[in-house]
Image: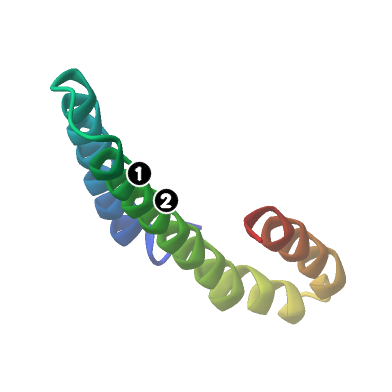
Amino acid sequence: MPHAHRQQVLNRLARVKGHIEGIQAMIEADRSCPDVVLQLVAVRSALNKVAQIVLLDHIEHCLIEAAEIGEFEGELKNFQKALDLLV
């Protein structure tokens, strides 16, 4: 089953990719370290948002579906593992 927020995640990842290319250009242009770090923090924040959307999708679909077919415990453990990686 495709993820409900798939296109939203892909769009955000494309923006992150562009942002990273911009950071590469900043480094090639010898921009100041604080400017580069600011952009790196922005990328990290954008990736965290992508992870939140993926986890939301997991809650909205995978956990609910698992509960309906009696496999909630196992899927909850998968969710917890993913959440542990994020935090």
Q: Residue furthest top?
A: 28
Write the residue at 55% across / 77% down.
60
Which residue is depicted at the point 66% across and 74% down? 65
Task: State the colouring used for the structure image.
Answer: rainbow
Q: Of the residues tagged 2 and 1, which is closer to the observer?
A: 1
Quarter of the picture containing the C terminus is: bottom right
Would residue 73 appear left or right of 50 to someone viewing this image? right
Circle number at residue 44: 2
Residue at 36% over, 56% down: 46
Identify residue for label 1. Answer: 40
Q: What amino acid type is highlighted by mark number 2?
A: Arg
SS at mark 2 in the image: helix
Q: Amino acid at mark 1?
A: Leu
Q: Nearer the viewer, residue 71 or 85?
A: 85
Outermost residue on the left side: it is 29
Q: Are marks 2 and 1 in contact (CB under 8 Å)?
A: yes
Residue 18 quadrant: top left
Dividing the picture into quarters, in which one does residue 55 lie? bottom right
Residue 23, x across and y down, in percent: 24, 33
* For residue 11, above or below residue 61: above
Q: Is residue 67 left or right of residue 36?
A: right
Q: Residues within 10 Å of mark 1 (few under 14, many from 20)?
A: some
Residue at image coords 21%, 30%: 21
Q: Could you say where residue 24 lies in the image, as x and y percent from the top left?
A: 24, 26
51 relative to 33, above or below = below
In the foreground, 61 or 29? 29
Query: Between marks 2 and 1, how big is the CA–CA gap?
Result: 6 Å
Which secondary structure lies at badge 1? helix
Front-most of 75 and 71?
75
